Amino acid sequence: MSKMHVKLTVNGKEVEGLAEPRTLLIHFLREDLKITGPHIGCETSHCGACTVDIDGKSVKSCTTFVAQVNGADITTVEGLTNDDGSLGVLQEMFREHHGLQCGFCTPGMITRAHRLLQENPNPTEEEIRFGMAGNLCRCTGYQNIVKAISASADMLNAQKEAAE
Amino acid sequence: MNDQTLTPEERAANLKGMGSSRKRVEDVRFTQGKGNYVDDIKLDGMLFGDFVRSPYAHARVVSVNKEAALALPGVIAVLTAEDLSPLGLHWMPTLAGDKQMVLADGKVLFQGQEVAFVVAEDRYIAADAAELVEVEYEELPVLTDPFEALKSDVVLREDLEGQTEGAHGPRKHHNHIFTWEQGDKDATEAILAEADVVAEEMVYYHRTHPCPLETCGSVASMDKVTGKLTLYGTFQAPHAIRTVVSLISGIAEHNIRVISPDIGGGFGNKVGAYAGYVCSVVASIVTGKPVKWVEDRMENLMSTAFARDYWMQGKIAATKDGKITGLWCHTTADHGGFDACADPTKFPAGFMNICTGSYDIPTAYLAVDGVYTNKAPGGVAYRCSFRVTEAAYFIERMIEVLAIKLNMDAAELRRINFIKADQFPYQSALGWEYDSGDYHTAWDKALKAVDYEGLRAEQAQRVEEFKAGKTRKLLGIGLTHFTEIVGAGPVKNCDILGLGMFDSCEIRIHPTGSAIARLGTISQGQGHATTFAQIIASEIGLPADDITLEEGDTDTAPYGLGTYGSRSTPVAGAATAMAARKIRAKAQMIAAYLLEVHDDDVEWDVDRFAVKGAPERFKTMKEIAFAAYNQAIPGLEPGLEAVSYYDPPNMTYPFGAYICVMEIDVDTGEWDVRKFYALDDCGTRINPMIIDGQVHGGVTEALAIAMGQEIAYDEMGNVKTGTLMDFFLPTAWETPNYITDYTVTPSPHHPIGAKGVGESPNVGGVPCFSNAVHDAFRPFGLVQSHMPHDHWRIWKIANGLGMHG
């Protein structure tokens, strides 16, 4: 099958490669770019393990062709670590509040939570639960994920306030 | 920080040992997307395998034409049963003493069965090629009902024709697998005949699936130069897989290295051996290249191990004031096309004989008949010890049914029948010795915590309001007191494929006082690297943060039977403590030598040995470790390490009291969990944070099972719930918050008194949610209705009771 040229910005770096028109973004990220944070859990957009951030929106990369997002700015969970290599706020709060167990849903969860807190910096518990409903977890029962996101919101707001 | 200025309590806290809510060491990797799951493994020249699967539930395979597939550029091979049969690999043994086709050998027995394995340069080409394999089928009559199957002339397993003796005794019919009987049949029937009251009910526990978020997969790499096979995969029991691969392939066991990398949830799904694992191995041998196989979600739900599917006919006898005198159960177990249950060999229905539950029932009888049907094989313990959740669901429903018959409060009926604290160790009528328990204390604590009496008053008022037309919502109060049996198990009666179910731990202390420990188990999210280090920290006084844990590589880890059935803490946790104690015993001799006193003149004090009566004269474990490597100590070998293979003397019996308060809309069938209280007694608590996390997750899986999740088939044997669109996994939106609580009744035979907790919440949660639904409708005449209680089925209950006008 003929291949097309794709160019993306992933986690702040410009990357390019060749992909078939039918190549899914998740496979391009995982197989070509070796970015294996986003996972494949269902291939039908239900589980959210493959969630990445594309041009400021949470997108399930298992049902997106890489050709559809040519030129896009993409962030994966790997891009949410601090520049000095330490855990980002969400990553640290997921650890602090035991918001993960097997870790398979975690990259998608954190990437979605990152966008949720951009959309709504002060979410209620109900808003977090609704905003995270596109990401499934089989281990945690969500209670500690909700706690982790709520704690992240508080910490990010405090950091913002301190900076102002 | 000066060791001498700290109190023993402060020194203990610094270790982050048992009882500490230590943060997980695994999370630094996982939160950054740096886990290493099987699909993350990429080897040079790796090929990708994909299956051609049967669209029919029962059919003869007339022919398989590979030509078009092989003609597609990038396709390397297409394997069928014909290709595997010269190697003897077209069938494989199951964990239950049956055998199972790896690739369809003349016929298929369930929809989604593996027919051919396509190997190609990438997964897209493999999927394309699978479409190009032409298979001609001849449809056969389909049996999806186990009761029909036992009467039908249709023979499902022609390979067993004429075989009247199965792996577990005589077969009564060509679609019958085994009968398993426990307890005293005659005595139980006599009690039923004479009883004041007998309640009888069919309790069906529907077919479902563990559905971990990561599907099953493997990467096989046969190195033709060294003759060594490396097999990575989603294995909950890597050592057992190595032995099985060796036995069926003929490759010597020392030439096989099995590695379970990070596993994205297991819940029982990853215990069994699957066709994909075998085919990836064969394909790697045939092609000389590494071969990856990873199933998609639909394949996972259709073909890898299901759970439950037990039809449990029950009779429970009692005096008129509610004292239970006998329990009778006959179970018809639908095993699908092959008996691939993952149970210890001597237990073809697992530990279903824990079905007397938390109650002192003097006489009982259980019979289980296993049956073949045209459904996927399996019967794994989905987040429970072998068939324990079926047993708990059965007894907890029968108690409710009896309460209705006696017109008694179900909480009180439980209380008057509980095994009393002074009866432990308790010998059950169906053959188990319960190690420890204090059910009355747990029950009273739970009822008080939720204001049980207040809830009952509110419910009575709600019924009045409903009858007066003031509300369309009912209130259900779900009760459950469960007793699990976990930690399989004693080698004398527990083995899988002849392998005794002990487990193991090896600990090496490094000269500078840090350590590495390796275990025969494998974490799938339970946090072993965190908690097992805590056990060692407490036992030998080195900080948990200085102890590395490794599992899952059979070349380095000691042999063990893996992680399932809540056996890691009861068995490998015990091995860990015992290995640590061996190290401490040697450390005592080293310390005595360094302190120039007799071995008996030093005593252990948190992280050091001190001279008795002179606590200022001591050697810390760190100092002792260094001495073990740099001093010639008379009579002692250098070094400081130990290994323990632990054969548990008994199972452990965790228990718990769960209460659910549920609102139900009779017009839409919608439900809302208003409160869920979970009290767990798992004996000694190693990491309370992780215990709470396990409970949250386990109850959520129970919520899914009770309230909507099922593997459903139509009469043609088509799977109706093959994607996450149809197969219910709760989101954050439906899932409630849980209140967790505990009592502590240590196991008397476990070195640290721990019992295991990962599966309790599923075992207790399912009956609790189901009982809440039943309880809501009890005032309107409902006795029994089968799970899953999805909106449609709840609406049907209301409709059947004439509540829609």
Image: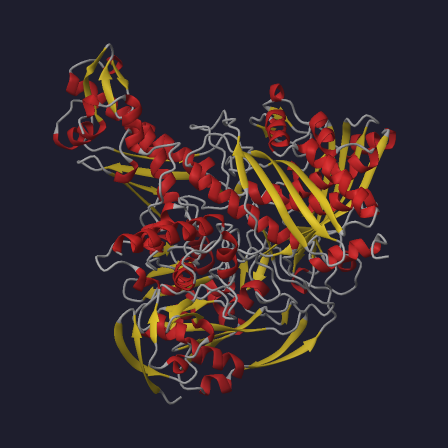
Kindly identify the residue that appears in the image at 34 percent across and 54 percent down. Answer: A156
Q: Quick one: which residue is furthest to the top in this view?
A: B613
Q: Which colour style is shown?
A: secondary structure
Q: Quadrant of the C terminus of chain A?
A: bottom left
Q: Residue at x 44, y 60 (%)?
A: B249
Q: Is residue B219 left or right of residue B209?
A: left
Q: Judge left or right: residue A22 versus residue B632.
A: right
> Looking at the image, can residue B181 be seen?
no
Residue furthest out toward the bottom? A2
Residue B188 visible from this viewpoint: yes
Residue that protrudes farthest toward the front in the picture: A164
Instruction: Choose between B424 and A106: the one closer to the eye.
Output: A106
Q: Which of the pair B742/A147 is nearer the observer?
A: A147
**Image quadrant of residue B708?**
bottom right
Relative to B621, is A71 above or below?
A: below
Q: Position of residue B51 (x, y in %)?
A: 51, 72
Q: Residue B624: where, in percent of width, then height?
A: 19, 27
Judge whether B411 appears above or below B331 on screen: above
